[in-house]
Image (tube, grey):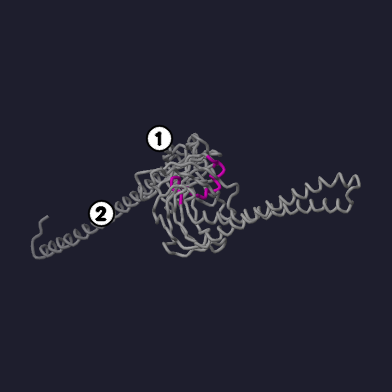
Amino acid sequence: MNFNGPFDAERVTETDRDKETVAPERRRSWGGRLAGFGLVLVAGAALASGAWSHYAERRQVLATAAQERNFVPQVRVATVEPSDNIEVVTLPATTSAFASANIFARASGYIGTRAVDIGDHVKAGQLLAEIVAPELDHQIAQAEATLAQLNSSLQQAQANRELAKVTWDRDRPLVDKGWVTAQQGTIDEQTLKAQEAAVSVAQANIKAEDAQLQVLRQQKLYQRVVAPFDGVITQRNIDVGSLVQADATSGTFMFTLQQGNVIRTQVFVPQDAAFGLKPGIAAVVRVPEIPDRSFPGTVTRIADALQPGSRTLLTEVDIPNPDAALASGIYCTVELHIPRRTPTYRISADALIFNAGGTQVAVVENGVAHLRKVRVVRDHGSEVEVDSGVRAGDQVILNPSVDLAEGAKVQAKPTTAVS
């Protein structure tokens, strides 16, 4: 339609203006709707993502729980081995001489000769020192003279006895016939008995004096101090001119002599090893200062009773020492090879479990762990000896976990034997 005139122009202008106003409002309405729809989509996507994450985590938790329920851990095991029939026990000891003698003076006097010094090797009967005592020689001479005098007195008493016997033998028939008085016969008989008693007294005096002379002569022999056995002089307390006294309690200490061709050691063996110990068992002595050599020996003597305080058995070991490589007073170690009286088993120290149940080990049987209580009798560091709870051939778990329980399923790795 065509409009002419001013009225129509103004009307057309208003209509166009209304159209221009309605169009932006419509556009704003559609934009709001699109934004709301987008928010709904974003929220839905977020909810879906959260639900999926929760579902995935739940599945993972369930899978982990199922895996833990069905998981069988692998463990390292070692085979229990029986101990050797010979138990080797190493103990500290100190060497000593096989025989040691402190030599004291048995005669009083002055040292006239000293033939040996510290470190000298001597033979049995060899002169060590000589004591000078002139007064002893005078006492011997006096005793010999007294003994000669007593022998003469005995001869006189014997002659008087013979005379009395002859007189009595002659007068007795005459007395019987009455030709000699009975009184004379009694006198002759008693005289004979008196002379016989005098002979007995003289013989006793001679015996006593001879014994005294033997004492003096023995003291004379004691002036020569000799070695009682082969050995080495380790102490010397006298010199030429020293005054020595012979006394049972306060005699002069002169020398110490030790026999060194055999060395003796004394060790105290613990009770758990003492019951298999007996004379003849082999022993090895080692000295730290002689690392390249060992000295074989033999148990020669053992005490019949254990020390009540330490529960140990005193044992003596003799070691041949022909080349004098060992001396007395040396610190050493004695290795005893003792036959084992009670069987024990060796297990790794890594298998021990210490808890409220005591000392235990975990033994694998048919893929199941069983806890067994054991008693350790000897600790060797990397391994221990036990006498109960296990037997030879058992497989014990090494380094078991702290949560290992009785009856737990385990899978054993290749077996390692205790060596």
Q: Residue placed farthest to the right in the image?
A: 178
Please tell me which of labels 2 and 1 falls first in the chain.
Answer: 2
Query: What residue sits right under mark 1 in the picture?
Result: 414
Mark 2 or 1: in front is 1
Residue 306 visible to the viewer: yes
Left-right relation of 266 to 10: right
The front one of 65 and 278 is 278
Is residue 350 visible in the rendered image? The answer is no
> In x, y percent, where is residue 309?
58, 56
**Mark 2 touching mark 1, by CB under 8 A?**
no
User: What is the number of callouts on the image?
Assistant: 2
| Amino acid tagged 2 | Leu
In the rendered structure, does residue 354 fall within the stretch colored magenta? Answer: no
Q: Which residue is mark 2?
A: 34
Residue 373 quadrant: top right
Judged from the image, the secondary structure of the residue bearing numbered disc 2 is helix
Mark 1 Cα shell of 10 Å, populated few (<14), some (14-19), many (≥20): few
Q: Around disc 2, counting alpha carbons within 10 Å, would you say few (fewer than 14), some (14 to 19), or many (20 or more)? A: few
Residue 28 placement, left or right of 371: left
Query: Residue drawn at (21%, 57%), measured in percent from left and top?
Result: 27
| Stretch in magenta | 258-279
Amino acid bearing label 1: Pro
